[in-house]
């Protein structure tokens, strides 16, 4: 009887340890990087990414978070995560001055002003033919199978603005 109790108590302890160890483990799940439901700029969405502006030997880098709700577009631009962000609130039907990406004016000329709606279409991978009319070169690189561009390059004179899209999701 004593051996039976000892054997049972050992199994209970081992069984309890197994249950506790399995109950405390987590299964890693990858968050969805790109939301396939966004089909137009009228929907609410959020985009996170990085940018790099190159002009001759000068380079400006940083990150951005673009949030669109209704007709309001909020663009947060930062150089690094330790410095304060610049927040730009825009109307979807208005224009965006591309000089907002540059903290110090390193260019001898002004960048073109884009329609906010065309800029959003560009980041979502929708057609944006208006940019070609404004003498802006455009290169899109799509890596994901969902059709969103992973890199958008705007070329204007001797300036190169590379926008890397990290995440797109619906609000």
Image: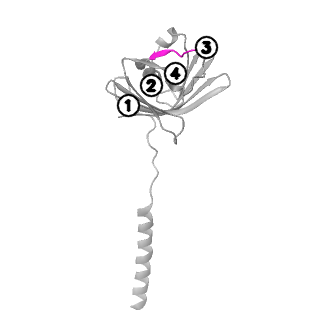
| SS state under label 1 | strand
- Residue at numbered disc 4: 99
CB within 8 Å, label 4 to label 1:
no
Q: Is residue 90 magenta?
A: no
Packing grade of label 2 (10 A; few <14, some 14-19, many >=20) is many
Q: Nearer the viewer, mark 4 or mark 1?
A: 4
Query: In the displayed image of the protein, which residue is found farthest to the top?
Result: 133
The part of the image, by quadrant, that contains residue 141 is top right
The part of the image, by quadrant, that contains residue 31 is top left
Query: In the displayed image of the protein, which residue is found farthest to the bottom?
Result: 2
| SS state under label 2 | helix
In this rendered view, identify the residue nearer to me: 97 or 22: 97
Q: CA distance from mark 2 to mark 4?
A: 21 Å
Label 2 vs 4, first from the N-terminus: 4
Packing grade of label 3 (10 A; few <14, some 14-19, many >=20) is few
Q: CA distance from mark 1 to mark 2?
A: 10 Å
Q: CA distance from mark 4 to mark 1?
A: 24 Å
Assign the magenta stretch its main secondary structure: loop
Report the span colored magenta. Answer: 108-114
CB within 8 Å, label 3 to label 4:
no
- Residue at numbered disc 3: 157
- Residue at numbered disc 2: 124
């Amino acid at each position: 009887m004593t051996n039976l109790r000892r054997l049972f108590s050992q199994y209970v302890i081992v069984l309890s340890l197994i249950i506790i160890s399995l109950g405390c483990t987590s299964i890693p799940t990858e968050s969805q990087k790109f939301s396939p439901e966004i089909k137009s700029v009228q929907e609410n969405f959020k985009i996170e990414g990085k940018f790099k502006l190159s002009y001759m030997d000068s380079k400006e880098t940083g990150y951005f978070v673009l949030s669109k709700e209704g007709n309001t577009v909020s663009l947060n631009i930062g150089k690094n995560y330790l410095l304060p962000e610049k927040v730009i609130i825009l109307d979807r039907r208005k224009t965006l001055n591309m000089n907002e990406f540059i903290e110090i004016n390193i260019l001898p000329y002004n960048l073109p002003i884009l329609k906010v709606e065309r800029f959003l279409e560009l980041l979502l991978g929708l057609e944006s033919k208006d940019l070609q009319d404004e003498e802006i070169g455009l290169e899109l690189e799509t890596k994901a199978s969902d059709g969103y561009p992973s890199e958008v390059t705007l070329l204007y004179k001797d300036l190169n603005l590379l926008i890397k899209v990290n995440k797109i999701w619906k609000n």
